[in-house]
Structure formats: structure tokens, C-alpha cells
Image (spheres, helix red, strand yellow):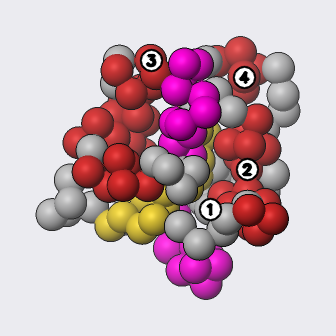
Amino acid sequence: MLEEIRQTNSVSIHARRSDLLFLNGHCYEHGFFKRSVNYIKKNVKNPVFIFFTDENSVGWCEENKKIFGIDTKQDQVRFVTWNKGTDSYRDMQLMAECKHNIFTESSFGFWGAFLNQNPDKITCAPDISILSTHTF
């Protein structure tokens, strides 16, 4: 996966649902992901969208790609599902290697984007204060 991330215009999507849905529900209900994905599509050539989510939400994300603005006939999409338990930190490492990042209100997603060293990265967060209080 790291090789694909480095060789493509990779975009991490950190979709934190199960334990933080009470905080991030608005991201799914009010189009945050769809607006973010559309912005990426307009500004990044041939993006590859790579989903990082908790293991209880993978199936939901796969079944609800339209909520994210993903067109399965046109968009390249991958799901990282193997980093579980004590290996969960690997998701953050991979998100940091992506060219661009989309994340919900989650410190895990935030750090994946914050650690991204691409000087031309696009970072999409649901609340501008998340981005303005930290140097990206």
C-alpha cells in the first residue's frame, strides 16, 4: 500500500464513525465528504481515494460511497482494513504518506494530516478552527 500511496495522487479519507458518530454525524449528513471529494477531484489529477476507518465501519463506507461523493465507475478507491489492534498506528503512518487528506473531527485523522510533509497538500477538515490553530 505504501508503494501505491507514493506512486499515485493518493488522498486519505479518515472516516471515523462507530465511536465518534455523535461528534461526526454532521460530516455524513450535511455533505462534508462530498464537498471535500469534489474539491479534490477539481484540483488533483487522477486522485486515488484511500479509506481509513475503524473495522466496524468498513462495510458501511463501502456500501455508502455516494455519501462521500465517490463514483465507483470513475474513481479509484482503496480500503485499508488490515491495521487492527496494536497495529492501528500503521493507518496514521499511511495517511501521513498520502499526498492529500480528508478527515473528520478526530485526533487520529488530524495527526495523519498534520504529519503529511507534502508541501502542496490539500487538507480538508470539517471545522476551519482545526486547521487554523495548527501550522500545516
Precedes in sequence: disc 3 or disc 2: 3
Marks 4 & 2, CB-CB < 8 Å contact? no
Marks 3 & 1, CB-CB < 8 Å contact? no
C-alpha distance separating marks 4 and 3 = 16 Å
Can you give x and y, in whole percent of width and height, for residue 1 in the image?
58, 79
Tell me the crowding category of disc 3: few under 14, some 14 to 19, or many 20 or more residues within 10 angstroms, Cα based.
some
C-alpha distance separating marks 4 and 2 = 13 Å
- Nearer to us of marks 3 and 1 is 3
Residue pointed to by mark 1:
98
Q: Is residue 92 left or right of residue 44?
A: right
Say which mark, if any, is on residue 26. Answer: 3
Q: Type of residue at label 1?
A: Cys
Precedes in sequence: disc 4 or disc 2: 2
Marks 2 & 1, CB-CB < 8 Å contact? yes
Q: Type of residue at label 2?
A: Gly
Say which mark, if any, is on residue 112. Answer: 2
C-alpha distance separating marks 4 and 1 = 19 Å
Precedes in sequence: disc 4 or disc 1: 1
Can you give x and y, in whole percent of width and height, for residue 56 in the image?
50, 50
Q: Is residue 103 left or right of residue 87?
A: left
SS at mark 1 in the image: loop
Residue pointed to by mark 4:
130
Tell me the crowding category of disc 4: few under 14, some 14 to 19, or many 20 or more residues within 10 angstroms, Cα based.
some
Can you give x and y, in whole percent of width and height, for residue 51 in the image?
49, 56
Residue 103's image quarter?
top right
Tell me the crowding category of disc 1: few under 14, some 14 to 19, or many 20 or more residues within 10 angstroms, Cα based.
many
- Residue range of the region highlighted in magenta in the rendering: 1-24
In the displayed structure, 82 sits above or below 115; it is below
Residue at 61% from the left image edge and 84% from the top image edge: 3
